Image (cartoon, rainbow, N blue to C red):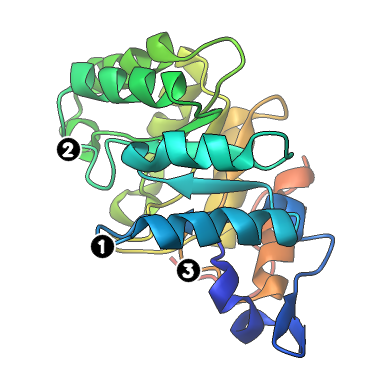
Amino acid sequence: MLVGNRQVAEEGGSTSGGVVRVPADVAPYIDHTLLKPEATREQINRLCDEAVKYNLYSVCVNSSWVSICARKLQGTEVKVCSVVGFPLGAMQSRSKGLEARCAIEDGAQEIDMVINVGFLKSGDLEKVEEDIRAVKRACRSTTTLKVIIETGLLTDDEKVMACQIAKKVGADFVKTCTGLAKGRAKARDIALMKRIVGPKMGVKASGGIRSFEDARLMIGIRRDPYWRECQCGNCNG
């Protein structure tokens, strides 16, 4: 889940003396994320400190900050995740591969790449596959590769095709959104994506998750192999 820690108090976390308390069942799913272009070294260091303090899963940063995060988090259980081709996904595939390779060399354990949505919507499925494969080739056997398909821009058929291609290439996860394009993570999309990729591949929700209740719903769908569609009554379209 992409949930910034500064938002946690507004999203259902309790506070005591100004200290945010993240529910223990949700914390291991949170990527503490800072992808703003104006992010400073001080903010990146604080991001890492907060991730350790609250037992969050990872920090997610732009690739230029990976080496700093890796040094800062050495010896902790917090992972370092780098975005690749973020946020548009429209760069050359070989450039994505190079960015991923450099980020991994700098200490990234996870890569969140953005697919080329234009290729997908044009029906150029071989190009979509090669785009993902270029990043997959850059990954090590220990690297977790997540493929952001930008669900808010896709039809259901396109979501299915994107998930099928990511699975074919050997990605570890498919992921809903960058959080910057149209749309947000929806329960029905998580259910659809999970149905397509099956139990051995992960699905990650990101974008527009505004409460711990929302987060728990997404986690529950991801874990439940029998989910077929959203049953919460609040997710239309």
Residue 95 image-quadrant placement:
top left
Instruction: Read off the residue under disc 1.
Output: 38
Instruction: Read off the residue under disc 3.
Output: 208
- The C terminus - image quarter: bottom left
Q: How many marks?
A: 3
Where 53 sits versus 134, above or below? below
Left or right of 134? Residue 214 is right
Q: Nearer the viewer, residue 17 or 172?
A: 17
- The N terminus - image quarter: bottom right
Q: Label 3 vs label 1: CA separation?
A: 21 Å
Instruction: Read off the residue under disc 2.
Output: 118
Query: How dense is the environment of label 2, judged by Cα within 10 Å: few (below 14), some, or many (20 and up)?
Result: some
Amino acid marked by disc 2: Gly
Query: How dense is the environment of label 1, judged by Cα within 10 Å: few (below 14), some, or many (20 and up)?
Result: few
The numbered mark at residue 29 is none
Amino acid marked by disc 3: Gly
Q: Secondary structure at mark 3?
A: loop
Q: Label 3 vs label 2: CA separation?
A: 23 Å
